[in-house]
Image (spheres, rainbow, N blue to C red):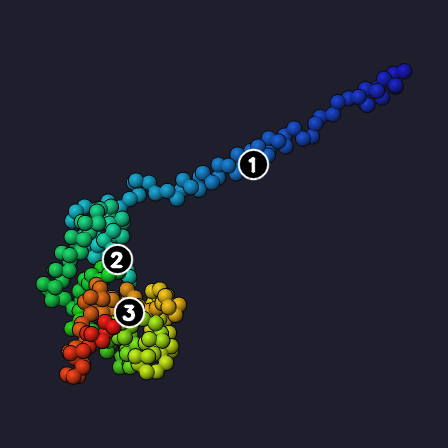
Amino acid sequence: MSESNEATERTVAPQEPATPQEPAKESQAQQETQTQPTEVMHTVQPSDDERLELSAEDIKPAVEAILMATDQPLQPADIAKVLSCTADEVEAILTDLRDGYDADGRGFELRRTARGWQYASRAEYEQAVQLFVTDGQTARLSQAALESLAIIAYKQPITRAQVAAIRGVNSDGVIRSLSVRGLIREVGTDPESHAAVLGTSELFLDYMGIDSLGQLPPLAPFLPAESAANSDESLEQ
């Protein structure tokens, strides 16, 4: 009888559950997963203490340093974001720097173009710079490329077929070269032929040192006397 009772006790004795702690582990893992994105988003937000604050005396040389460090034209608003000042203040500083360089007769200038402000060699010394950079090698556009670029500049928007008709030869190769150099770009589609129409780029304006196409030099002084009178009229057709 006692042996039977002992067997029954061993049979009905409750066993400790093996899985109560698993939901707790899953809950903890879910909490870590939910809190992790919040921590990452918090780290990428800059605090007010990290913003650059300069004195009035340091803003002007800081603008110079930024211009020296970039190879692309900058707008006043781009510089103002970094220096925590207004775009008008940066514009005034850039103008003052440009006038100062001009007054000192420096070999470089602070040039303002359609894309922004940028340091550049002064025009009267560009030949010396070109000879130094190329070391006697020719880095100019071909005659065909110059012809095509001039036609596009003065007749834009214009199609490839129209450029070829003016030059009298196929110009696809030189137009492709001008496009690769970034001097021209597609600006739309001809409504009749549905062909792409071409125009000059902002990089072209930078190389020319002008702000708009309206500042391109007139062609009349470069044409023969008998053609000068009709040059402007023919380009407007």
Please report whichever mark, 2 or 3, sits nearer to the chain's N-terminal start. Answer: 2
Amino acid at the residue labelled 2: Leu
* Residue 124, image x, y percentages: 15, 73
Quadrant of the image containing the C terminus = bottom left
Mark 3 and mark 1 residues within 8 Å of each other at the beta carbon: no
Q: Is residue 7 above or below residue 192?
A: above
* Residue 131, image x, y percentages: 23, 78
Q: Nearer the viewer, mark 3 or mark 1?
A: 3
Q: Nearer the viewer, mark 2 or mark 3?
A: 3
* Residue 30, image x, y percentages: 55, 35
Residue position for label 1: 29
Please report whichever mark, 3 or 1, sits nearer to the chain's N-terminal start. Answer: 1
Instruction: Evaluate whether residue 119 shows in this view.
Output: no
Residue position for label 3: 156
How far, Cα to Cα, is label 1 from label 2? Answer: 48 Å
Which residue is at 18% across, 78% downward? 230
Taking depth in this image into account, of 35 and 174 the one nearest to the observer is: 174
Please report whichever mark, 1 or 2, sits nearer to the chain's N-terminal start. Answer: 1
Query: How dense is the environment of label 2, judged by Cα within 10 Å: few (below 14), some, or many (20 and up)?
Result: some
* Residue 63, image x, y percentages: 21, 54
Residue position for label 2: 74
Which residue is at 52% across, 38% downward? 33
Amino acid at the residue labelled 1: Ala
Amino acid at the residue labelled 3: Gln
Q: Is residue 120 above or below residue 89?
A: below
